[in-house]
Amino acid sequence: MLSRRQKHIMLKFFSMFSVVRGYNILIVVIAQYLTSIYILAYDKPLKAVIFDVNLLMLVLASAATIAGGYIINNFYDSEKDLINRPIKSKLDRLISQNTKLSFYFVLNFAAAIMASYVSFRAVIFFSAYIFGIWFYSHKLKKLPFVGNLTSAILTILPFFAIFLYYLNFEKVIFVHAVFLFLMISMRELTKDLENMTGDLLLDYKTIPVVYGEKASKVMLTVLIVLTSVPVYLLLNHFDLGYMYFFFYLSVILLLVFLILLWKSTTKTHYLILHNIIKFIIVAGVFSIVLINVNLVLNRM
């Protein structure tokens, strides 16, 4: 049996894990490595990529920065989360705001140290990234369009860091990036619909609050139509190996999303839609290995 102190420590751990959304960070770390192995550095020996210390430092710096971003976002959104996510908010509040802020500064400092191992340019990049996350959480998040656009850009920046490291300028990478950007934009707008109650009460000027649910649904429909462009290009102009299964699945799920979207009226409905988009994004990460299932064996 666990003692009272041990239970308290475990609750604190799960609280901090919830605040930094450790599961999301794990997905980003996996995505960065899979992207490096199968797309950005596919022509390099497998061991050279996996055991590249510079790549490891960039991935860890990304993870630390993202974790810090979740903390500062949680700090500014504490009142809104209490309305929109009461259960999660209660768990998050087991850690004091002072402790969260202290951990935020430690994570950002650690990110700068790890980036400095790679290069001075990496330090500049992550410093700008840290500032961008803070400015978004403090100011831009409450603005329609600007907040959504900034959030989508900040989400894909960790992959841009890896892209800059390998300097791979193949067209297929940019098309993949456009697809990911559109999916994240859809997720952000769907999340705004899901959190509309808290945003309205606390005067967050999100798209659903300012322009209404119907306008938000029209925008999501337009984003789905735009998503068909990179999907078409990827399926018809690039060699994706077996990853084409993922894109056919994503088309089916987006059609389901679209049908459900126009029938949705409650927070629960929008939560289901949010989870569909999250599933597509996570499935896309793990389906990267399908680009060439024999690639790892051939590079051993």
Image (spheres, rainbow, N blue to C red):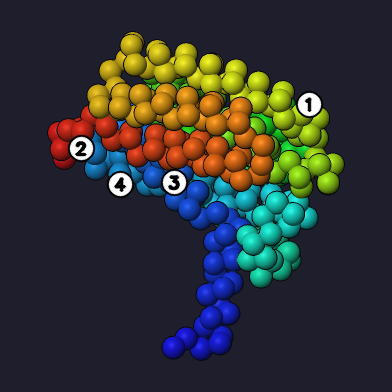
Q: Estimate the x, y position of residue 262 in percent, counting from the top left.
A: 61, 27
Residue tagged 3? 27
User: Which comes before the other along the chain, label 3 or label 1?
Assistant: 3
Q: Is residue 9 depicted above or below 204 in this figure?
A: below
In the rendered image, residue 238, in percent from the top left (x then y), is placed at: 32, 15
Q: Is residue 254 left or right of residue 98?
A: left
Percent position of residue 260, x then y: 55, 31
Label of residue 296 in the image: 2
Q: Nearer the viewer, residue 169 or 245?
A: 245
Residue occupying the point 67% across, 37% down: 265
Q: Would you name the residue on which mark 4 appears?
A: 51
Pick the residue in front: 287 or 40: 287
- The answer to which of marks 4 and 2 sits earlier in the sequence is 4
| Amino acid type for the residue under numbered disc 4 | Phe
| Secondary structure state at the residue bearing disc 2 | helix
Q: Report the Cα–Cα distance between label 4 and label 2.
A: 14 Å
| Above or below: residue 225 compared with residue 208 | above
Q: Earlier in the sequence, mark 1 or mark 4?
A: 4
* Residue at 48% across, 53% down: 23
Q: Are marks 3 and 4 in contact (CB under 8 Å)?
A: no
Q: Which mark is residue 211?
A: 1
Q: How many marks?
A: 4
Which of the 4 image quadrants contains residue 287?
Answer: top left
Depth check, mark 3 against mark 1: the one in front is 1
Q: Nearer the viewer, mark 1 or mark 4?
A: 1
Left or right: 8, with 23 as reference point: right
The span from disc 3 to disc 1 (Cα, nearest Å) is 33 Å
